[in-house]
Image (tube, rainbow, N blue to C red):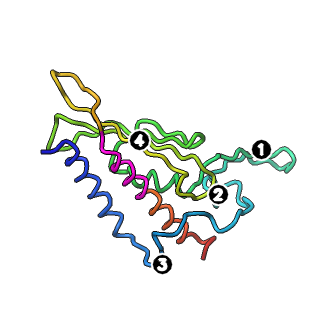
Amino acid sequence: MNINKSFSIILISVMTLMGCSHNPNINNDEEIVTKRERPYAHMDKLLGEDTLLFSSTSSNKRSQKTVGIGINSYLWRASLDIVSFMSLRSVDPFGGVIITEWLTPENNHQERFKVDIMITSRTLRADGVRVQVTKQILKSAQWTNTVVDPHIAITFENAILTKARQLYNNSPATN
């Protein structure tokens, strides 16, 4: 079986599952951006409207401290959803980084894959997410990196952007 074919089958499965929550109001040719900048009124919530926020509660408003995370919450939640079929090795919501564990396809134990996702934007934009897929094959009882079709990373990015747009369109703030 082609080395990339196994991972493609996994990716198609993920895309098929995403299709179950299709929103017909989404135009895939639109540029993904937020409609407007919003003030973050609900600072005590883990997930703000557009950005993840954490705050300490205090009776004195002047001493209340809020730490904003420089990533878009829709991209973050969509990324976690898209890679939910893989075990997570490292998750950093402050830096916008998700690193998965190695995934070995059931039908080919001679190869494995890992996905690294980096959220780089506070707004919901097409260039706000970067995905790197790493593939290794087992040669002489040792794992060796091999070339991955760049289209696989692009497919992951598009899946994340589509899911983020669905989350944004279904959020109470946009209805």
Label 2 vs label 3: CA separation?
A: 24 Å
Residue 153 belongs to magenta span: yes
Q: Earlier in the sequence, mark 2 or mark 3?
A: 3
Q: Amino acid at mark 4?
A: Gln
Q: Which mark is residue 48?
A: 2
Label 4: which residue?
132
Q: Nearer the viewer, mark 4 or mark 2?
A: 4
Q: Quadrant of residue 36?
A: bottom right
Q: Is residue 98 above or below residue 158?
A: above
Q: Which residue is mark 1?
A: 65
Q: Where does the image place residue 44, in percent across and percent down from the top left?
A: 69, 54
| Mark 4, other Cα within 10 Å: few <14 / some 14–19 / many ≥20 | some
Q: Secondary structure at mark 1?
A: loop
Determine contact: label 4, label 1, CB under 8 Å.
no
Say the numbered circle drawn on residue 25.
3
Q: Is residue 147 above or below residue 149?
A: above
